[in-house]
Image (cartoon, helix red, strand yellow):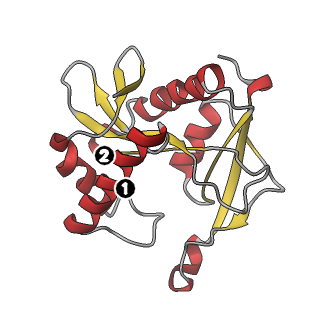
Amino acid sequence: MKLAETERLIIRNWEERDRALFHEINSDDTVMTFFPMRRTRAESDALFDILHARIVETGYGFPAVELKQSGEAIGFTGLNAHYSADIKPEGTPEIGWRMATRYWGKGYATEAARAMIRLAFKERGHDQLVSFAVADNHRSTAVMERVGMKRDLDGDFDHPSIPESHAHLKRHVLYRLFRADWQG
C-alpha cells in the first residue's frame, strides 16, 4: 500500500522485509535519545504488527519510507490519528518521523514530511497538523521548521506517556502548520 511518493522516496506500508530496520531504529541509542525506552526485537515486532494493521485499516500511522533507487526502507514518517488530550483542537493529526542514523543529513525526513503534509492537506482535507518533540531535540524541531511549521508557544506540554523516571524528557514543544499557511 503506497501512500505517497517523492523524487527519491516511496512512503508505503511496512513489509515483512522491513522488520530488522524497524527494530534497528527503535533500539538505537542515538535515534532514541529523546525517548524513554529502547525496544527489544519482540517489542519492536509487536509494534510493527500494530502499525501495519492500523495503516491498512485507517491509512494513518507511521508507514515506512523507502529509497526509490534501492527499494530499501530507511525509517518512517506519517500522520498519527491517535490524538493526545493535550493537543487542541481535538482531532488534529500529528506528523512525525524517525530515520536510521546512516540516513541522517540527507534531507530524507524533510522530503518525506513534505509528502505527508501534502497528503494531509490535499487528499485528506485536514485544516492543520501538529508535531511535537522534547525541547532539546533540535534535529526534529529543525525538520518541523524546514517544512514550514511554527512553534505554538502556548501549546508546550508535559507528555503524559513519559514516566517520572525520565522527567527530563517530559516537556515537549509543540509546532503547528495550518493549511492556509502551507506553501505546497
Q: Is residue 47 left or right of residue 4?
A: left
Residue 31 is labelled as: 1
For the residues bearing labels 1 and 2, Cβ distance under 8 angstroms: yes
Which quadrant of the view contains residue 50? bottom left
Pick the front one: 90 or 156: 90
Q: Which residue is mark 2?
A: 100
x, y percent for residue 137: 54, 56
Question: Marks 1 and 2, Cα distance to the nearest angstrom?
Answer: 7 Å
User: Who's the residue at 65% across and 16% down the image?
Assistant: 184
User: Who's the residue at 78% across and 25% down the image?
Assistant: 181
Q: Amino acid at mark 1?
A: Val
Q: Is residue 28 placed above or below 159 in the rendered structure?
A: above
Quadrant in which the N terminus appears: top left
x, y percent for residue 134: 59, 61
Q: Is residue 85 placed above or below 116 in the rendered structure?
A: below
Q: Earlier in the sequence, mark 1 or mark 2?
A: 1
